[in-house]
Image (tube, rainbow, N blue to C red):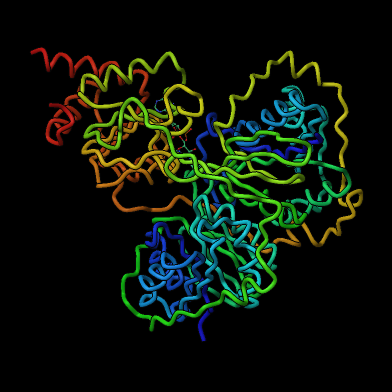
Amino acid sequence: MGQQVFAYIIHKDGVADDTALELIAAAGKLDTDASVTAVIAGAGSELDSVCNEVASFFDEVWKIDNPALAYVTAEVLRPLLVRILPKHGIVLVPHDHFGMDLAPGLSIKINAAYLPDVVDFEGIDNGKLKAVREEYTGQVSTHVLSDISQGAVITVRPGSFKADERKSGDGLVIDKTAQAIESGLLVGAHRFLEIIEAQVGEVDITKSDILVSVGRGIEDQDNMEMIFELAEAMAGDVSCSRPIVDAKWLEKSRQVGTSGQTVKPKVYMALGISGAFQHVGGLKGSPFVIAINKNPRAPIFQVADVGIVGDILDFIPELTERINELKSA
Amino acid sequence: MEILVCVKRVPDPSENEIEVNKDGTDIEGDDLVYSVNEWDNYAVEEAIRIRDKVGGSVTVVSVGDEEAEEVVRREMAMGADKGILLSDDAFEGSDGKGIASILTAQVKKENYDLILTGALADDGAAQVGGMLAAMLDWPFASLVNFIEILDDKKIKVGREIAGGNQEMYEMDLPCVLSIQTGINEPRYVSIRGIRKVASLEIPVHTAGDLGISPESVGEAGANTKCLDYFVPELGDGARILEGSTDEIIDNLIELLKAKGGIK
Ligand SMILES: Cc1cc2nc3c(=O)[nH]c(=O)nc-3n(C[C@H](O)[C@H](O)[C@H](O)COP(=O)(O)OP(=O)(O)OC[C@H]3O[C@@H](n4cnc5c(N)ncnc54)[C@H](O)[C@@H]3O)c2cc1C
């Protein structure tokens, strides 16, 4: 018999997240004979529509339905999962802002192994799972071996497994609410208040066809000017990676990535950007990506169409000058 | 308010290009420049700001060998009041759970109101803060980018979620928060500042001091082991433009024209 794998399903407005079907693929790679149960928490009709949406892809769907779960928070959910998960089960959770909140503590509470931010699995041997992770923001990869015989909580990097869209399950939805909530919800020490929406900035980079995107390689705020000059020459807009926003050199609305904007330009210039998955995760619609980086092994060269190994501080002014010459000719 | 901040000494990402060593057992270590983990530095800055507002003290703790002392000292130069090093041969090779249980032992010896960690470090695992909270049975929030002290029992916390949005919470103390970059602008530490704290004593606590049985931590207690390091062979990758700068620019401009990057 295969492993019993549980996939935690993130959803919003009654629709399952893209990661739902990615977790099925991940479970299949972990163990081809795995039986995969979707675990979904939420409230009312929105929850039901998510359950119906994913049911036919999974062997089984477990739902936890309570008005207090209309907005699911990790602190409230964790003790409920502890009550319903069987001993030694394998739990897959997307490695995003929710998974990072939920999963490490869950592994402690169910006394299981913890494997964070996994990008691939390479088989189970004798109760030990071999998995692939990345370290140093993707500069190197590593094989890790983890004893999962007592169960495991594994966060899976979004986008690492190609969604498995075969309808294979029998769609049985099982209501686990009573078991999960038997002795009440724990909301005391941690009270959700509200969501503050991101502020809209002076430019909307989600609408730009040409983005000149700058990263930490720009080194100094004084050098930012050359990025704007290049963007102007190319009739594009300036976007950036996160450290530029952290340093307050550009406003948050110009940040590309999972915690910033999702953009879909035709041309994307990545200048002094290493190519962390949280950054590249914000690039959609297969733009033509040009990367300029002084490190020939920077991960951005794996996603770029064209790469230039060199110093942006030297290269950009020359490029801008040449484009301007061309335009005035 | 008594605040504990957990910090790690890591290879500085802005100073190093990380490479795998010859036999793939580790990263190439010879010329690495180390510093305090970027996220931890924001956590220490935040702790100092809270202390300056509401009083109390900031303690910086690191699990590591004697070299970890330099990052603890650096954070004391920033303005932390105390430093502690948790160091023992038995701690070597600990996985995330091992580190969290060593920190738990330290926390239980004292009375802290608030514990801050960085959201993640060089291994990208983002695990220690959440595990520590679970071991202590304290509330937890990750990726925190806003903290406001409401009174000595409650705080208001913002968490960064997708798309630049923010989740707001009210949390009871004591609690554990993992800090996201950008929550503040960490102050600069001068060489002079470091010299000023050079003679301050940083106590070292061993497994024995903390009441930790050596086989429960370190390599012996680790559930997850790192087998090797490698650079994955991925698809085609980018076409690298070669030649003189002029040739590269010619080439690039043609490509940009073709793809609509120059109108
Ligand atoms: C929960 C979470 C969410 C995140 N969300 C986002 C997000 O939305 N967007 C985002 O961008 N990041 C995000 N990050 C951060 C992300 O992990 C990386 O830390 C970040 O993307 C790195 O930015 P960077 O590439 O500019 O800097 P670095 O990784 O420091 O890379 C700088 C690059 O510049 C190169 N370089 C340096 N000098 C030069 C030069 N003179 N010429 C040419 N090249 C040079 C270096 O070789 C290096 O490759 C998030 C992290 C977390 C934990």
Residue B211 percent location from the top left of the image? 90, 54
> Residue shown at 11%/12% (left/top)?
A328
Residue shown at the point (62%, 68%) measured from the top left: A80
In the depicted structure, whether residue B222 falls above or below residue A248: below
Can residue B30 be seen from the camera position used here? Answer: no
Q: Is residue A277 above or below residue A307?
A: below
Q: Quadrant of residue A229?
A: top left
Quadrant holding the N terminus of chain B: top right
Q: Is residue A249 left or right of residue A305?
A: right
Q: Is residue A23 above or below residue B124?
A: below
State the image coordinates of residue B88 (x, y, percent, origin top left).
83, 48
In the rendered structure, the answer to whether residue A212 lies left or right of residue A172 reads left
Asked where in the image residue B32 lies, by quadrant, the reply is top right
User: Which quadrant of the frame does ligand 1 lie within?
Assistant: top left
Residue B215 quadrant: bottom right
Asked whether residue A222 is in view, the answer is yes
- The x and y percentages for residue B142 are 60, 46
Seen from this angle, which residue lies furthest left? A329
**Is residue B75 toward the left or the right of residue A226 in the image?**
right
User: If the image is split into quadrants, where does the C terminus of chain B sit?
Assistant: top left
Q: Nearer the viewer, residue A204 or B132?
A: A204
Q: Residue furthest bottom?
A: A1
x and y percentages locating residue A16 in the rendered image: 39, 62
**Residue under the image location 67 percent in, 28 percent down:** B45
